[in-house]
Amino acid sequence: MRRIILPIFLLIQASLPAQTTGSWKAGAADVDITPDYPVRLSGYGSRTSETQKVAQRLHANALALQWQDDEPAVMVSVDNCGVPAEVRAEILKRLAARGRGLPAERFALHSTHTHCAPMLKGVLPFLFGEDLPEEHAKHIERYTEELTVHVVGIILQALDKMEPARVEWNSGKVYFAFNRRLKTEKGFQNAQNFSGPSDRALPVLCIRSANGKKLIATHASYACHCTTLGINEIHGDWAGLAHEELELRFPDSICLIAIGCGADQNPYPRTENRFAIDHGVSIAKEVVRVINGPMLPLSGPLNCARQEVMLPFDKLPTKQEWQVRASDPNKWTAYHARKHLAILERGEKISPALPYEIQVWSYGSGLLTINLPGEVVVDYSLRFKNEFDSARTWVNSYTNDVPCYIPSNRIWEEGGYEGGGAMIYYGRPTRFAPGIENIIAGTVKQLVPREFSAGQIQDHP
């Protein structure tokens, strides 16, 4: 049953600042990416069959931004558990072939991490602890290709629709995310931890036409798993419902929802559709409240930077250790071991490290966004907001790739699912070596402009 936001009106004229920034261009586009054939869903390894049931339609959304005569930059949000780096690279390749190439640092691809969307080739390959039936694999490959085509299409549409625009931002708060790592006598369990760290900020980017009379797009992110639901039906979960509510209220605009550092955060309450609706509505209502209030105008340039680093794995198992694990009664442990034994038997080497691309965007001196791949725990967001100006810092994860969980030093030491246990489902050979937080944080610091350091005074446009 649909639920609509209580009447909250977009007070465009009232919210306009006296001074405008007229050197932006922006365009946005949306496409339905719901499959019309059976497909295996990702996110939960207990599923054993494909589904054709559609509880909510899925979307991909694109926003193109350009400051003056600089190259445009594009962000895309996709209702999916995780879009892999290989798909992102193919999108960039196809754009270049169409004469609309984007530098990799100027393309941000966000996954909403809903666990009720089709599996994509290259993400969570060991999730089910067994090889998939040939027909299931074909449908996954088909959907991966179709999604690639769809995303290329909406990027081209967004670029073609660019018009003079104004770009503003501010931040609100939403409260349904709670830490999910509860310490017990048997270790850390996936359960609500009221005293654990969380980041409930809801940063919101608002793009209007140059005269302020048209809402072109909104973009928001929240640091929480998109796992209210566990049904074997296609559904966008709270992120998809927030998108639906906002586009219902503003049918001529595009809404992009992303996920912050929410790898160790769950939505509560959960498991029922009514809770997913409540969470999605709370996001949408807060977005509306923020864009109806005072917004901070952003000027350019939009500086984009990236750097790939290697995150080393801990000591790799020996061939003998893999052989022992291949006989483990746990089917996921055994499958993981057999797959790695096959690598060694082909005469290949198991990679000792994970390539990891860090991306930083800065809108003049007004806003810093840090985009991190993978399932990043909340410690990173809290750290970067402490090291840089918290009033101007926005941290996303699940961006440009979703290769595995990214634990902090604290969580690596504590262990548990986010600390290393989940690596088996992502097909990684073992947990990370100690210290990857320092590698990531050091690289981010190199990429962030100095004017965003904590204590620096912002010059408002």
Image (cartoon, helix red, strand yellow):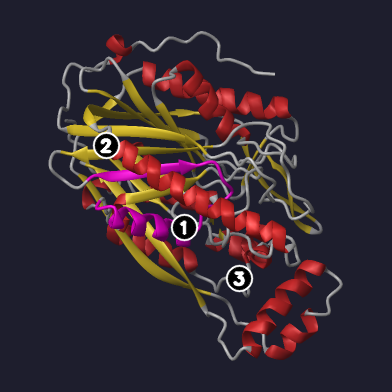
Question: Is label 3 in contact with label 2 (beta carbons under 8 Å)?
Answer: no
The dot on residue 219 is none
Q: Residue at x 27, y 54 (%)?
A: 101
What range of the chain is rendered magenta?
72-99
Residue 306: image location, x then y, percent? 31, 59
Looking at the image, tell me whether mark 2 or mark 1 is earlier in sequence order.
1
Residue 74: image location, x then y, percent? 32, 44
Local SS, label 1: helix
The residue type indicated by label 3 comes to Arg
Q: Residue at x 39, y 43 (%)?
A: 153
Q: Which residue is mark 2?
A: 160
Which residue is situated farthest in the left direction here?
Answer: 69
Local SS, label 3: loop
Q: Which residue is mark 3?
A: 428
Marks 3 and 1, Cα distance to the nearest angstrom?
19 Å
Q: Is residue 278 left or right of residue 6?
A: right
Q: Which residue is mark 1?
A: 87
Marks 2 and 1, Cα distance to the nearest angstrom?
22 Å
Residue 87: image location, x then y, percent? 46, 57
Res. 394 in view? no
Local SS, label 2: helix
Bin the neighbour count of mark 2 within 10 Å (Cα to Cα): few under 14, some 14-19, many 20 and up. Answer: some
The residue type indicated by label 1 comes to Val
The residue type indicated by label 2 comes to Asp
- How many numbered badges does the structure rendering display? 3
Q: Is residue 301 left or right of residue 244?
A: left
Residue 96 covered by magenta stretch = yes
Q: Residue at x 41, y 28 (%)?
A: 254
Where residue 187 sits, quadrant-wise, is bottom right
